[in-house]
Amino acid sequence: MNVNLNSRPRSGPKKSRSTTKKFFLSVSLLIKLVLLLSGFLLLWNVVSLVNKRSTSSSSSLRNYSGDQKYHVVFSTSCSLKQDWQSYLFFFHAMIHNQPGDVTRIVSGCSQEQEISMRELHQKQFAIMNPNFLIHFTPEFGKQVEGFSFEQTKYWNKPFGLKHWLEHRFGYRYEGDISTEYDDDIVVLVDPDMLMQRPFINDFSKFSISIWNKYYREHPELLLDKVTQGHPAAQDYSFGEAWLTAASANLTYVVGPDSPVHHVTTKEARSVYAAGPPYWMTARDAYRIAYHWSDFLPRIFKLKPVFMAEMYGYCMAAAHLGLKHQMARGFMVSNVEMTEGEGWQFLEKADDTVCDVSQFKDTVPHVLHFCQRYSIGEYFINKHIFPTGLLTCDFPLVELPPLDILSKVNYSHYGDMTTELWAGNDREYYKRTRHAFMVCSLFPALNEAATFYKKHHCPNGANYDQKWNHFREKDEYMKVTP
Ligand SMILES: *[C@@H]1O[C@H](CO)[C@@H](O)[C@H](O)[C@H]1NC(C)=O
Ligand SMILES: *[C@@H]1O[C@H](CO)[C@@H](O)[C@H](O)[C@H]1NC(C)=O
Ligand SMILES: *[C@@H]1O[C@H](CO)[C@@H](O)[C@H](O)[C@H]1NC(C)=O
């Protein structure tokens, strides 16, 4: 794709001719008068704008935090089931004072669903912060015959992102793709990520240990912030898998002339194996979204796996030569990971780990709760989550005692298996990680549920901290939102 980034078609001023000179003379006089008047008005406006700059509401799209504008965005399908995740996400964006706006992209609603969803958004999310927004797109997840929706539902992420960037900011992939929003920062996350700190475009205060191995070995390459052409992302440790997924016919996916043909294995592993949270300028976001959506169906054809969606992102980044500053420490998720995630902040943690406030300055940006977590009899898994949590009658979650690690040395899981943690065990570190996740997630759920109950239960609500997966499962799992 050849895109001219500099030239914008210009239409020069045209002089029209007429036979009735008198008429035009009076018109031009009138115009001069209007110009003079509007000149005065303009001057007046500029003066008052300078005075009132901070209170200006001239652009509702923007929220100023220093000079940087932020847009955090996540994609969901049009189902109520994901609502508790969106609720958690918005709620924690609120309590962490995320600057800018946060947008939920919802794909595939019918017209009636869109109306209810919009009402729900006003009622539940806009009250947290008027800069929490919703954007609707068509369904992009059902394009492939012979494959289930489960396999392709993540396609809503690239196509939804592209749709949002086009409709919200006016991006188009033709001619000059620039808009006035080019330097805004877009942070693309997943709804099952619990924010622990705001996304601020300033990495200068982070320890070098948050970056992946490549950048730790090349600290001279590290930038303090995301800029045009320099995005950042979490390293997802899948190495060059995104490239080999298309190796059967790379030309079919990216064309004969793409820079992807020259990406080395080392580059594929160290600067392109990116995943959420993705940070980039709005302009880079649009360039990536465009190629991501373009490549994904063809990657899926060569390798029909749900990971094709993530691989598509990497392919697009490599196609554009957008090397990512890759972190291992934007996220934690998998307690088994030895190198690839941001668990370093727990290295020296002791049995007080459940007092999670001690990690507020060192914890990664998000807890990606896509695994199962348990310490003692406290278990959580998003796939068997009590969706009734955001109702008036459902109790809050029973919290583990802060000193639980001085009492128990095991994890009990939903499938009724148990793992014992012993101090001489090489995998003993998992005990601390499980405890940290449970002791972060459970209070976070309760805070969000309490906010819900305070605002949406005029006839009172159940605030008992009582729900436990093992004990009350049968009674409460029946409650539907
Ligand atoms: C910016 O967002 C904050 C909340 O994060 C809100 O209180 C404030 O009114 C917003 N400012 C503007 C100018 O929209
Ligand atoms: C790869 O794709 C190209 C473009 O679609 C096609 O012309 C070519 O025959 C394919 N090659 C192989 C080996 O499948
Ligand atoms: C858990 O294991 C550690 C290391 O073996 C031991 O020091 C501690 O006493 C154990 N805690 C409990 C509650 O059994």
Image: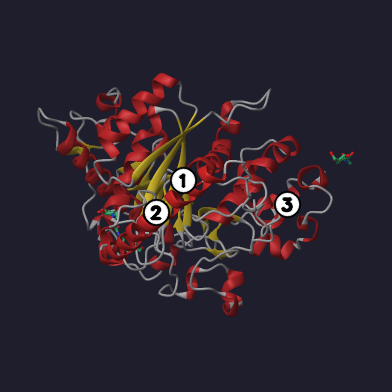
Pointer 1 local density, CA inside 10 Å: few below 14, some 14–19, many at least 20: many
Measuring from the top left, give residue 172's x and y in whole percent.
Answer: 60, 45
| Count of marks, rendered view | 3
The circle drawn on residue 181 is none
Q: Are marks 1 and 3 in contact (CB under 8 Å)?
A: no
Query: Relative to the observer, which residue lies in front, 180 or 210?
Result: 180
Query: Within 8 Å: ligand 1 and the Cβ of disc 1?
Result: no
Query: Which residue type carries mark 2?
Result: Leu
Kindly indicate whether the residue at mark 2 contacts the one at mark 3 (C-beta within 8 angstroms).
no
Q: Is residue 302 left or right of residue 406?
A: right
Where is residue 239 shown, x and y percent of the image?
66, 57
Percent x, y for residue 342? Answer: 46, 62
Which badge, 3 or 2, comes first in the chain's sequence? 2
Label placed on residue 190: 1
Asked if the residue at tag 1 contacts the one at tag 2, i.e. Cβ–Cβ closer than 8 Å, the answer is no
Q: Which residue is mark 3?
A: 243
State which quadrant residue 303 falls in. Answer: top right
Left/right placement of residue 154 relative to residue 103 reads right
Q: Amino acid at mark 1?
A: Asp
Location of mark 2 (residue): 33
Within 10 angstroms of label 3, few (less than 14), some, or many (20 or more) residues?
many
Image quadrant, ligand 3: bottom left
On the rendered structure, is 320 left or right of 355? Answer: right
Question: Tag 3 or tag 1, which sits nearer the N-term?
Answer: 1
Helix, strand or loop at mark 1: loop
Q: How are the colours assigned in the image? A: secondary structure
Percent of width and height locating residue 24: 53, 46
Q: Relative to residue 192, is residue 426 depicted above or below?
A: below
